[in-house]
Protein backbone atom coordinates (compact mmCIF):
# COMPACT_ATOMS: atom_id res chain seq x y z
CA UNK A 1 0.00 0.00 0.00
CA UNK A 2 1.25 3.47 -0.83
CA UNK A 3 2.46 5.69 1.99
CA UNK A 4 -0.58 7.69 3.09
CA UNK A 5 1.63 10.75 3.41
CA UNK A 6 1.85 10.86 -0.39
CA UNK A 7 -1.84 11.77 -0.41
CA UNK A 8 -1.41 14.60 2.06
CA UNK A 9 -1.96 17.95 0.29
CA UNK A 10 1.23 19.21 1.92
CA UNK A 11 3.18 16.69 -0.18
CA UNK A 12 1.47 17.62 -3.45
CA UNK A 13 2.91 20.28 -5.75
CA UNK A 14 1.08 23.56 -6.12
CA UNK A 15 -0.95 23.28 -9.37
CA UNK A 16 -1.48 27.00 -9.88
CA UNK A 17 -0.02 28.43 -13.13
CA UNK A 18 2.46 30.53 -11.14
CA UNK A 19 4.01 27.34 -9.81
CA UNK A 20 4.77 25.85 -13.23
CA UNK A 21 8.45 25.70 -14.26
CA UNK A 22 9.82 28.65 -16.23
CA UNK A 23 10.92 26.28 -19.02
CA UNK A 24 9.16 23.40 -20.82
CA UNK A 25 12.50 21.90 -21.87
CA UNK A 26 12.01 18.85 -19.67
CA UNK A 27 8.82 17.92 -21.57
CA UNK A 28 9.45 18.84 -25.21
CA UNK A 29 9.97 16.16 -27.87
CA UNK A 30 12.21 16.96 -30.84
CA UNK A 31 11.51 15.73 -34.38
CA UNK A 32 14.22 13.38 -35.69
CA UNK A 33 12.50 12.14 -38.84
CA UNK A 34 9.10 12.68 -40.46
CA UNK A 35 7.43 10.26 -42.87
CA UNK A 36 4.31 10.87 -44.98
CA UNK A 37 2.00 7.86 -44.72
CA UNK A 38 -1.02 9.20 -46.58
CA UNK A 39 -2.04 12.43 -48.30
CA UNK A 40 -5.81 12.74 -48.45
CA UNK A 41 -8.11 15.42 -49.80
CA UNK A 42 -7.56 17.60 -46.74
CA UNK A 43 -6.04 15.31 -44.08
CA UNK A 44 -2.40 14.23 -43.97
CA UNK A 45 -1.26 11.18 -41.99
CA UNK A 46 2.33 11.24 -40.73
CA UNK A 47 4.66 9.00 -38.76
CA UNK A 48 7.41 10.92 -36.97
CA UNK A 49 10.37 9.71 -34.98
CA UNK A 50 11.01 11.95 -31.98
CA UNK A 51 13.70 12.36 -29.38
CA UNK A 52 12.27 12.27 -25.87
CA UNK A 53 13.51 14.50 -23.03
CA UNK A 54 15.64 11.60 -21.75
CA UNK A 55 17.34 11.17 -25.16
CA UNK A 56 15.50 8.00 -26.16
CA UNK A 57 13.53 7.75 -29.42
CA UNK A 58 9.83 7.03 -29.95
CA UNK A 59 7.32 7.28 -32.79
CA UNK A 60 4.31 9.56 -33.10
CA UNK A 61 1.55 8.80 -35.61
CA UNK A 62 -0.72 11.79 -36.15
CA UNK A 63 -3.01 13.63 -38.54
CA UNK A 64 -2.29 17.11 -39.88
CA UNK A 65 -5.51 19.13 -40.13
CA UNK A 66 -5.95 22.61 -41.66
CA UNK A 67 -7.95 23.89 -38.69
CA UNK A 68 -11.64 24.68 -38.30
CA UNK A 69 -14.19 27.02 -36.76
CA UNK A 70 -17.48 26.65 -34.91
CA UNK A 71 -20.17 29.30 -34.66
CA UNK A 72 -22.65 29.84 -31.82
CA UNK A 73 -25.51 31.72 -33.56
CA UNK A 74 -27.40 33.58 -30.82
CA UNK A 75 -30.84 35.08 -31.43
CA UNK A 76 -32.01 38.23 -29.66
CA UNK A 77 -34.39 36.17 -27.49
CA UNK A 78 -31.53 34.01 -26.15
CA UNK A 79 -32.22 30.94 -28.24
CA UNK A 80 -29.57 29.41 -30.49
CA UNK A 81 -29.36 27.85 -33.94
CA UNK A 82 -28.14 24.26 -34.27
CA UNK A 83 -27.86 21.55 -36.91
CA UNK A 84 -28.61 17.87 -37.30
CA UNK A 85 -26.02 16.13 -39.47
CA UNK A 86 -25.03 12.53 -40.16
CA UNK A 87 -21.41 11.81 -39.21
CA UNK A 88 -20.25 8.80 -41.16
CA UNK A 89 -17.26 7.72 -38.99
CA UNK A 90 -19.54 7.07 -36.00
CA UNK A 91 -22.65 6.24 -38.08
CA UNK A 92 -24.93 8.64 -36.20
CA UNK A 93 -26.91 11.83 -36.69
CA UNK A 94 -25.48 14.39 -34.26
CA UNK A 95 -26.73 17.69 -32.88
CA UNK A 96 -24.12 20.41 -33.43
CA UNK A 97 -23.49 24.09 -33.87
CA UNK A 98 -22.52 25.16 -37.43
CA UNK A 99 -18.87 24.46 -38.13
CA UNK A 100 -16.39 23.78 -40.88
CA UNK A 101 -12.74 23.56 -41.88
CA UNK A 102 -10.61 26.38 -43.20
CA UNK A 103 -10.02 26.68 -46.92
CA UNK A 104 -6.43 27.38 -48.08
CA UNK A 105 -5.32 30.94 -47.21
CA UNK A 106 -8.65 31.65 -45.49
CA UNK A 107 -8.77 33.46 -42.16
CA UNK A 108 -10.64 31.95 -39.26
CA UNK A 109 -13.22 34.76 -39.16
CA UNK A 110 -13.82 34.61 -42.91
CA UNK A 111 -14.33 30.86 -42.57
CA UNK A 112 -16.84 31.36 -39.75
CA UNK A 113 -18.87 33.86 -41.78
CA UNK A 114 -18.78 31.62 -44.85
CA UNK A 115 -19.79 28.47 -42.99
CA UNK A 116 -22.67 30.15 -41.17
CA UNK A 117 -24.08 31.48 -44.42
CA UNK A 118 -23.47 28.33 -46.48
CA UNK A 119 -24.89 25.90 -43.93
CA UNK A 120 -27.75 27.93 -42.45
CA UNK A 121 -28.41 30.93 -44.71
CA UNK A 122 -27.91 33.30 -41.78
CA UNK A 123 -25.57 36.28 -41.62
CA UNK A 124 -24.60 38.12 -38.43
CA UNK A 125 -24.15 41.77 -37.53
CA UNK A 126 -21.60 41.12 -34.75
CA UNK A 127 -18.90 38.50 -34.33
CA UNK A 128 -17.01 37.73 -31.12
CA UNK A 129 -14.00 35.43 -30.82
CA UNK A 130 -14.38 33.18 -27.77
CA UNK A 131 -11.47 30.76 -27.65
CA UNK A 132 -9.40 28.17 -29.50
CA UNK A 133 -9.74 24.50 -28.58
CA UNK A 134 -7.70 21.43 -29.55
CA UNK A 135 -10.21 18.55 -29.59
CA UNK A 136 -7.89 15.59 -30.31
CA UNK A 137 -4.46 16.51 -28.93
CA UNK A 138 -3.13 12.93 -28.85
CA UNK A 139 -3.21 12.34 -32.62
CA UNK A 140 -4.14 15.49 -34.55
CA UNK A 141 -2.98 19.07 -35.10
CA UNK A 142 -6.61 20.18 -35.42
CA UNK A 143 -7.72 23.37 -33.72
CA UNK A 144 -11.21 24.84 -33.67
CA UNK A 145 -11.80 28.56 -33.14
CA UNK A 146 -15.13 29.32 -31.45
CA UNK A 147 -17.11 32.41 -32.42
CA UNK A 148 -20.31 33.93 -31.08
CA UNK A 149 -22.52 35.46 -33.79
CA UNK A 150 -25.22 38.02 -32.87
CA UNK A 151 -27.69 40.14 -34.81
CA UNK A 152 -28.76 37.29 -37.06
CA UNK A 153 -30.51 37.81 -40.39
CA UNK A 154 -32.08 34.87 -42.22
CA UNK A 155 -31.35 34.05 -45.85
CA UNK A 156 -30.86 31.12 -48.23
CA UNK A 157 -28.25 28.53 -47.46
CA UNK A 158 -25.72 27.29 -50.03
CA UNK A 159 -24.80 23.76 -49.05
CA UNK A 160 -21.84 22.11 -50.72
CA UNK A 161 -22.55 19.35 -53.20
CA UNK A 162 -23.09 16.14 -51.25
CA UNK A 163 -23.75 18.01 -47.98
CA UNK A 164 -27.02 17.25 -46.17
CA UNK A 165 -28.08 18.81 -42.88
CA UNK A 166 -31.08 20.26 -41.08
CA UNK A 167 -31.16 23.42 -38.95
CA UNK A 168 -33.36 24.11 -35.94
CA UNK A 169 -33.69 26.60 -33.08
CA UNK A 170 -33.43 25.53 -29.44
CA UNK A 171 -33.55 26.97 -25.93
CA UNK A 172 -30.25 26.92 -24.07
CA UNK A 173 -31.83 24.95 -21.20
CA UNK A 174 -32.82 22.23 -23.66
CA UNK A 175 -29.26 22.03 -24.95
CA UNK A 176 -27.93 21.32 -21.46
CA UNK A 177 -30.53 18.60 -20.97
CA UNK A 178 -29.33 17.01 -24.23
CA UNK A 179 -25.74 17.26 -23.00
CA UNK A 180 -26.64 15.70 -19.65
CA UNK A 181 -28.53 12.85 -21.31
CA UNK A 182 -25.81 12.17 -23.88
CA UNK A 183 -27.94 13.18 -26.85
CA UNK A 184 -25.32 15.84 -27.57
CA UNK A 185 -21.91 14.15 -27.56
CA UNK A 186 -19.99 16.40 -29.96
CA UNK A 187 -17.17 17.85 -27.85
CA UNK A 188 -16.97 21.22 -29.58
CA UNK A 189 -20.71 21.74 -29.13
CA UNK A 190 -20.47 20.84 -25.45
CA UNK A 191 -17.56 23.23 -24.87
CA UNK A 192 -19.28 25.98 -26.85
CA UNK A 193 -22.49 25.58 -24.84
CA UNK A 194 -20.67 26.01 -21.54
CA UNK A 195 -18.84 29.05 -22.91
CA UNK A 196 -22.14 30.56 -24.00
CA UNK A 197 -23.70 29.96 -20.59
CA UNK A 198 -20.80 31.70 -18.85
CA UNK A 199 -21.15 34.67 -21.21
CA UNK A 200 -24.93 34.90 -20.86
CA UNK A 201 -24.71 34.78 -17.06
CA UNK A 202 -22.24 37.67 -17.08
CA UNK A 203 -19.56 35.61 -15.35
CA UNK A 204 -17.33 35.80 -18.43
CA UNK A 205 -17.22 39.09 -20.31
CA UNK A 206 -17.15 39.29 -24.10
CA UNK A 207 -14.33 41.18 -25.73
CA UNK A 208 -14.86 43.70 -28.48
CA UNK A 209 -16.48 42.51 -31.74
CA UNK A 210 -13.96 41.28 -34.31
CA UNK A 211 -13.75 42.22 -37.96
CA UNK A 212 -11.54 41.42 -40.92
Image (cartoon, grey):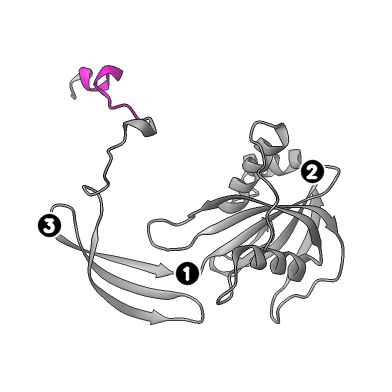
Q: Give the image quarter of residue 3.
A: top left
At x 81%, y 71%, the residue is: 157
Q: Secondary structure at mark 3?
A: loop
Q: Quadrant of the C terminus?
A: bottom right
Say whether residue 75 is magenta: no
Across and down, in percent, residue 78 comes to 81, 42
In this rendered view, identify the residue nearer to me: 63 or 179: 63
Query: Pointer 2: what residue?
Result: 171
Q: CA distance from mark 2 to mark 3?
A: 53 Å
Magenta region:
5-15
Say whether residue 11 is magenta: yes
Answer yes or no: is residue 40 visible. yes
Q: CA distance from mark 2 to mark 1?
A: 32 Å
Across and down, in percent, residue 172 comes to 75, 41
Mark 3 or mark 1, earlier in chain? 3
On residue 146, the disc is none
Answer yes or no: is residue 186 visible. no
Q: Residues within 10 Å of mark 1 (few under 14, many from 20)?
A: some
Q: Is residue 149 left or right of residue 50?
A: right
Across and down, in percent, residue 56 comes to 13, 59
At x 59%, y 51%, the residue is: 185
Query: Pointer 1: what residue?
Result: 65
Query: Pointer 3: what residue?
Result: 55
Q: Residues within 10 Å of mark 2 (few under 14, many from 20)?
A: few
Q: Quadrant of the N terminus?
A: top left
Q: Secondary structure at mark 2?
A: loop
Amino acid sequence: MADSSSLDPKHLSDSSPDSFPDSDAGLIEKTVESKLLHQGKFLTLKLDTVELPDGKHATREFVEHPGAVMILPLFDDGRVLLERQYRYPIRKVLLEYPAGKLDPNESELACAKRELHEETGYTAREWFFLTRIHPVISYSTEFIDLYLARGLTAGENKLDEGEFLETFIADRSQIFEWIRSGQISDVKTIIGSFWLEKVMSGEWKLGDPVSE
